[in-house]
Amino acid sequence: MVRRTDEKEKGVWRSLDWWTILIYMALLAFGWISICGASYDFDMEGNIFSFDSRSGMQIVWIGTSLALGFILLMLDGKLYDTFAYVIYALLLVLLFVTPFLARDIKGSHSWIKIGPFSLQSAEFAKCATALALAKFMSAYGYNISRWKDFLVTLAIIVVPIVLIILQRETGSALVYLAFFLMLYREGMPGAVLFTGVSAVAYFVVGVRFEHVMLGHIPTSAGEFLVMMMVILFTVGMVHVYCDKVSVERNILFYGVGVIALALGFSGFVIPFDITWILVTVCVAMILYLCYVALSERVMRYFYIALFALGSMAFFYSADYVLNSVMEPHQRVRINVLLGLEDDPSGAGYNVNQAKIAIGSGGLRGKGFLNGTQTKLKYVPEQDTDFIFCTVGEEEGFWGAAGVLVLFLVLILRLIHLAERQPFAFGRIYGYCVMSVFLFHVFINVGMVLGLTPVIGIPLPFFSYGGSSLWGFTILLFVFLRIDAGRNLAKRN
């Protein structure tokens, strides 16, 4: 029995994807160097390895993460499949009780204090959600195109999102939207992904140009552009999914024609708000699509009509959400990002200082521990959410590009590992891991550069803290153990 166990352990180590582990180790090393640069205090000499410093404590987190990864690799890979729902249920309970146990930290109730340490339950729920999705979607007879299966899949994702929002931790909740990338890989219709992208476009264009008028016509440019986008996107979906030229022609000829006449009359005869003309055309288009669906008995027209109706409902509710639902600081951040407000000393301060820090690094950087912006503490949260600005200042363009290339290699490697899985469970979980990493890197680096809203999510393996580092390690090493099991079975 002992000999068989030893042989199994050796088989696991031989079957591991060591390239991914090397990338993981490299990111840990570069992350620790960045935390040293962001948190070093010249008034306290030799404090890099002191447990009283951030860099010293990060060594503890790195050491415990390596130990945690080792433990996960030693467990039987089948346990993750067998107990996926149990792990998911336990984490949901933890998410539910967190607001009652956590103290208020900057308005958030997401950190549970355990002795001298604090842990964020949302970081660990990512792995639990990924396991539950993989378990459910790999079951016999699952079909993502069937409404019942798709709705249950959405529920697995949405429930933790709701519980995390109750903790007032919106940024962590948004990370769970990354799982939709996995759903797209597993056969989710492209129309669903396109609907999400369209919603973002409606929101950005509508908010950005809400108070801009169409020349001398008393109509909001934002509203006009969004309504035209709804019409054109609807025609595009008819072309892709139904390919009925007559329906496309009727919508464009009559719909756009009526809007063009209204624009001409309002611009050259009697100026008036053509908003009601736009709404009427869109409603008529929806009714026409429903009529075609009933007369030709093609349900795709009905779904496209729902898309158009949902687009209008989303656009007209977006203003209410922005001004009445979102917190004031969230609203200001969006306005600053879209250029509607200039608040360099308030909501835009973090991003402006981060840009200055990255820009001052130039091509080759200022060198380790020589960053002026970070040493003088001009960048808030520079060792957590804004850690990437330290990389840009001290290591310059080449260092920052090198870090991004390293993340790119990790993501491509995860895709490769996911695609070679013989069973759906491993493939789905692998794409969940890849999606989470991709979302974190894209949003974190984007917010440091001022390209995405500041939502406060960490950069994997770089941002200081045990919860995020443990969470990412668990995500990655569970997948590595599943992949090693695949190789082990192949060897046998």
Image (cartoon, rainbow, N blue to C red):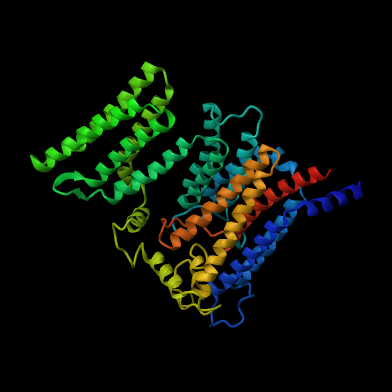
485 horizontally vs 177: left or right: right
Q: Which residue in the rendered view is the most extreme toward the front?
A: 245
Q: Residue at x 41, y 68 (%)?
A: 355
The answer to whether 277 appears left or right of 69 in the picture is left
Q: Nearer the viewer, residue 341 or 312?
A: 312
Say which residue appears at 34% left-offset and 68% top-offset. 345
- Quadrant hosting residue 85: top right
Picture coordinates of residue 217, whole percent (x, y): 15, 45
Task: Please state the horizontal and vertical placement of residue 171, each as a whole percent of the image.
Answer: 47, 52
**Vertical placement of 106 versus 271: above or below?**
below
Q: Is residue 457 visible?
A: no
What residue do we see at 47% from left, 57% from top? 456
Residue, x 59% and y 83% (percent of image)? 45
Name the spot of residue 102 as percent of width and height, x first.
53, 53
Q: How many marks?
A: 0
Q: 259 above or below 334?
A: above
The quadrant in which residue 226 appears is top left
Quadrant of residue 26 within the rendered picture: bottom right
The residue nearer to you, when weighing 461 against 407, is 407
Between residue 39 and residue 491, name the one nearer to us: 491
State the residue lying farthest toward the left.
Answer: 269
- Where is the C terminus found, in terms of image quarters? top right
